[in-house]
């Protein structure tokens, strides 16, 4: 079952006199409960694709769908609802509220979601049951990112889009964050797409897409995905 797909997606940014072709006709299908990873050099279009599939940005041409909903035909208001109801975002920087504890940062989101997960449960899924009362400044970078992940899953999104979630972490800490994402994908069946440069990610992905100059140059299925530890 297809959750997200795109056909002929292009994105052109106009910067002064120059047109930057960020996406040059991308076709992609993401299936329910799969773990997809996007690799490729900086500037190859990965974030741009995420922003369009996640309803954060509009394409220049081509089409993208969430199930039967054509995202590329949606108004800003419809895209806002799509993001709120269906997508969990994780970025390089955690954007936690410093004056709130880990538990309170997660609870803030669950107050407005239609069928949220209790904050304790979301924090336990990322291994932070012992840290719920800590403030962001009392947590390591990897722990702060796991709070941000707990916040994203607490609204039970169907899709998680993670744009360089390990970008600010050393590689060992990054592995723990990727394992937390892998466990969520297995246990909740959340469809997940991750942009990362961490080499371990090839082992925990179901499929790996390689980007270059605004196109997908390779899509490889991984038949030997490792179980999260
Ligand atoms: P990646 O995620 O693979 O690093 P991006 O999608 O961020 O790539 O960027 C693709 C291309 O689009 C790059 O050349 C980048 O400089 C350009 N780009 C991205 N965002 C903007 C923007 N807001 N304005 C102008 N150019 C942009
Ligand atoms: P880049 O890939 O160029 O470093 P980012 O990944 O930080 O850029 O951001 C890409 C896009 O996602 C931007 O258009 C920004 O508006 C949006 N964005 C970044 N962080 C958040 C956030 N915490 N919540 C919502 N949107 C965000």
Image (cartoon, helix red, strand yellow):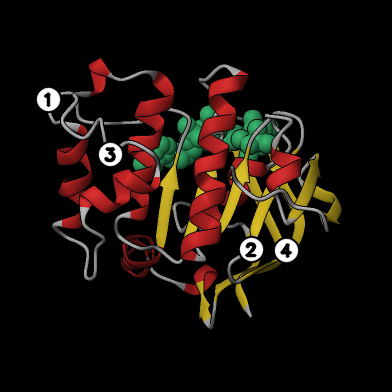
The residue positioned 64% from the left and 35% from the top of the image is: 196
| Mark 4 nearby-residue class (10 Å; few <14, some 14–19, many ≥20) | some
The residue at which mark 1 appears reads as: 99
CA–CA distance in space, label 3 to label 4 = 37 Å
In this view of the protein, can residue 22 be seen by the observer? no
The residue at which mark 2 appears reads as: 34
The nearer-to-camera label among 3 and 2 is 3
The nearer-to-camera label among 3 and 4 is 3
Name which of mark 4 and mark 1 comes first in the sequence.
4
| Element at label 1 | loop
The residue at which mark 4 appears reads as: 28
| Mark 1 nearby-residue class (10 Å; few <14, some 14–19, many ≥20) | few
The nearer-to-camera label among 1 and 3 is 3
CA–CA distance in space, label 4 to label 2 = 13 Å
The residue at which mark 3 appears reads as: 129
| Mark 2 nearby-residue class (10 Å; few <14, some 14–19, many ≥20) | some
Above/below status of 137 relative to 82: above
> Image quadrant for the N terminus?
bottom right
CA–CA distance in space, label 4 to label 1 = 40 Å
Name which of mark 3 and mark 2 comes first in the sequence.
2
Instruction: State left or right for residue 167 relative to residue 123.
Output: right
The residue positioned 37% from the left and 27% from the top of the image is: 143
């Amino acid at each position: 079952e297809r959750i997200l797909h795109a056909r002929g997606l292009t994105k052109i940014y106009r910067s002064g006199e120059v047109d930057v072709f960020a996406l040059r006709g991308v076709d992609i299908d993401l299936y329910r409960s799969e773990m997809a990873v996007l690799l490729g050099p900086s500037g190859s279009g990965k974030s741009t694709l995420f922003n369009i599939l996640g309803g954060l940005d509009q394409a220049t041409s081509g089409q993208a769908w969430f199930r039967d909903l054509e995202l590329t035909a949606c108004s800003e208001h419809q895209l806002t609802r799509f993001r709120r109801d269906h997508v969990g975002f994780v970025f390089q920087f955690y954007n936690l509220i410093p004056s709130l504890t880990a538990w309170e940062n997660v609870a803030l989101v669950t107050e407005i979601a239609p069928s949220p997960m209790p904050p304790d449960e979301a924090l336990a899924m990322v291994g932070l049951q012992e840290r719920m009362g800590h403030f962001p400044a009392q947590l390591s970078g990897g722990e702060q990112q796991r709070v941000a992940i707990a916040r994203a899953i607490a609204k039970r999104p169907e899709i998680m889009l993670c744009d360089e979630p390990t970008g600010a972490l050393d590689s060992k800490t990054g592995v723990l964050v990727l394992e937390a994402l892998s466990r969520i994908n297995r246990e909740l069946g959340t469809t997940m797409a991750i942009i990362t440069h961490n080499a371990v990610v090839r082992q925990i992905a179901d499929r790996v897409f390689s980007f270059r100059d605004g196109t997908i140059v390779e899509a490889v299925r991984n038949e030997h995905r490792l179980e999260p530890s």
